[in-house]
Image (spheres, helix red, strand yellow):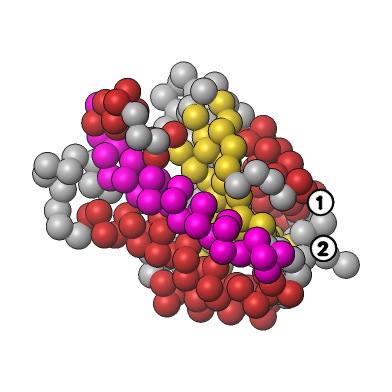
Amino acid sequence: MAKGTIVVAGHGPGISDAVARRFGREGYNVAIVARNTARLTDAAEALGKAGIHAKPFPCDLGDSAGVRKMLVDVKAALGPVTVLHWNAYLGAAGDLTTAKPNELPMAMDVAVNGLIAAVQEALPDLEAHKGAVLVTGGGLAFSDAQVDAAAVQWGAMGLAITKAAQHKATGLLHKKLESKGIYVGEVVVLGMVKGTAFDSGNATLNAADVADKFWELFEMRAPATVNFGG
C-alpha cells in the first residue's frame, strides 16, 4: 500500500524528476504535472520501468482553475495528496525594459498564483495527513547587488522577481500552516543543475543530491528554507 501521493508540479528532466524518483522509491504514488502531454507520458513510462507508480497529469500550472481541477483528478486517480512539490517556473520578462505587458503576470501566475491555488485545493488532504509542501527556490530571489547584476546579464530579470515573490510566499505559508501540522519548506538552489535547460556544460550540481535534500527536509520538517550549492 502506498504511503501517500506526491504531486510533482513542473516536471522535467532535472530536480523534479529526481524528486519523483526519490519519493517513488520511498513508496509514494507519483503524479507528474507539466504542459507537454507527450513528454509527460514518456516520463511516466520511464518512472514505471523504475518500479515507481506514476501517472501523468497535463496541466498549465499558470491557470489556477486548471491547477485545482488537476488536483481533483489526481485525488480521484491516486488518492489523497499528501505531498506537493512545486518546481514550476516561466522564464518570461527576461528584460524588464522590453518585456510585453503580459509576460511578468504570466510568470507570476506560474510561480506564485498556481502554487497558492494548489495549496488551497490540496489543503484538506494535507491537513488530514499532516502533509508537506516542498518548493524549489533559486538564488536569484535574494536581494544582493551581485545577484541583481547576474539576473540582468543572464536575461533573467522576470525569473528573479517571481522567485523572490515565491520565496516570500513560501515563508508565509510555512508560518500559516505549521499550526495545522503541515510542513512547508524550500530548497534554494544556488547553482546550475546538470542535465537541465540551464546547463551549458558548466553545471556542478546533481539533481539527485537536491532531491535527497528535499527528502531530508521532508523527514525533519525543518527548517523553512535551506540553501543548496553555491
Viewer-closest of 115 and 92: 115
Q: x, y percentage for residue 183? A: 66, 57
Q: x, y percentage for residue 111? A: 41, 55
Q: Are marks 1 and 2 in contact (CB under 8 Å)?
A: yes
Circle 1 residue: 26
Disc 1 on helix, strand or loop?
Answer: loop
Q: Residue furthest right?
A: 1
Q: x, y percentage for residue 92? A: 27, 48
Q: Hey, what amino acid is under mark 2?
A: Lys
The residue lying at 45 percent from left, 48 percent from top is 167
Q: Quadrant of residue 9?
A: bottom right
Q: Which residues are magenta?
A: 153-181
**From this viewpoint, is residue 41 visible?**
no
Q: Is residue 54 above or below residue 126?
A: above
Label 2 packing within 10 angstroms: few (<14), some (14-19), many (20+)? few
Q: Quadrant of residue 8?
A: bottom right
Q: In the image, which disc is placed on residue 142?
A: none
